Amino acid sequence: MKKRKLKGFVLPTIYVLVMALVFVSISILGSSLEVSSYDHLSVSALKKDSKPVISTDQDKETNNVEVKIVKPFTNEKVSVSKSYYDMQDDETRQQQSLVYYENTYLQNSGVLYSADEAFEINTVMDGTVTKVSEDEILGKVVEITHNTNLKTVYYSLSEINVKKDDFVTGGTVIGKSGDNNLANEKENCLLFEVYYNGSTLDPIDFYSMNINDLQ
């Protein structure tokens, strides 16, 4: 049999093609591994960005901070003249919670405080003054809104230190006690009301509540 001799350029050509194929294969494999690796890291980073541990903890701490509610006065000589009228109370306590005006007994929608001397009146917590007015029966009035569902109202002031749209912090003195036209009341009074979702709350209960429950 006659042997055929390969031409001189064939082997170098085959060698170049094989090396090129190896190089392309290695490049494709390396590229695939690199994409897979960075894709995994990228997803992990997105998860961390969407749910950061530190941010979440801070949010919880902010939402769970208990805002302290203070009484609307600091004078220890102030006492309760008429309590809040509660439909669930017994008859005796309900009678003690009635206020008398022009031959009519009215259910007390707040707590009526009084003292023998004038006392300063302060806001019970942070809020914005939404109304300053005067009532012909209850005297000068200040309304403070604390959030969309909660507001407090202060009646029977003789002096008012704030104006509408003022922002006040808890404990800020907003005025001084005064009188009203209710029967048998002292000259230095404060009728304090709390409204939550349009309904009144007993202020005595309100002082011990967590404001986060009244959002």
Image: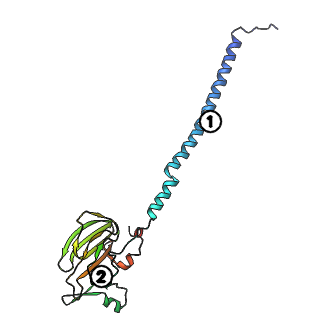
In this rendering, would 141 be left or right of 24? left
Residue 78 sits in quarter: bottom left
Amino acid found under the numbered disc labelled 1: Leu
User: Which quadrant, please, contains the C terminus?
Assistant: bottom left
Q: Alpha carbon of mark 2 to alpha carbon of mark 1: how far?
A: 77 Å
Nearer-N-terminus badge (2/1): 1
Query: Can you tell which mark lies on residue 33?
Result: 1
What is the x, y in percent for residue 109?
A: 29, 80
Observer-nearest of 52 and 140: 140
What is the x, y in percent for residue 14?
A: 69, 16
The single residue placed furthest to the bottom in the displayed view is: 92
Q: Are marks 2 and 1 in contact (CB under 8 Å)?
A: no
Observer-nearest of 147 and 115: 115
What is the x, y in percent for residue 18?
A: 68, 20
Q: Nearer the viewer, mark 2 or mark 1?
A: 2
Q: Residue at x 67, y 21 (%)?
A: 19
Q: Residue at x 34, y 85 (%)?
A: 87
Q: Residue at x 60, y 32 (%)?
A: 31
User: Which quadrant, please, contains the N terminus?
Assistant: top right
Neighbour tally class for label 1: few under 14, some 14-19, many 20 plus, Cα within 10 Å: few
Q: Secondary structure at mark 1?
A: helix
In this rendering, would 68 be left or right of 131? right
**Number of numbered tags placed on the structure image:** 2
What is the x, y in percent for residue 147?
A: 33, 65
63 up-or-down from 97: above or below: above
Observer-nearest of 24 and 177: 177
Q: Residue at x 26, y 82 (%)?
A: 117
Amino acid found under the numbered disc labelled 2: Tyr
Q: Secondary structure at mark 2?
A: strand
Neighbour tally class for label 2: few under 14, some 14-19, many 20 plus, Cα within 10 Å: many
Residue where numbered disc 2 is placed? 113
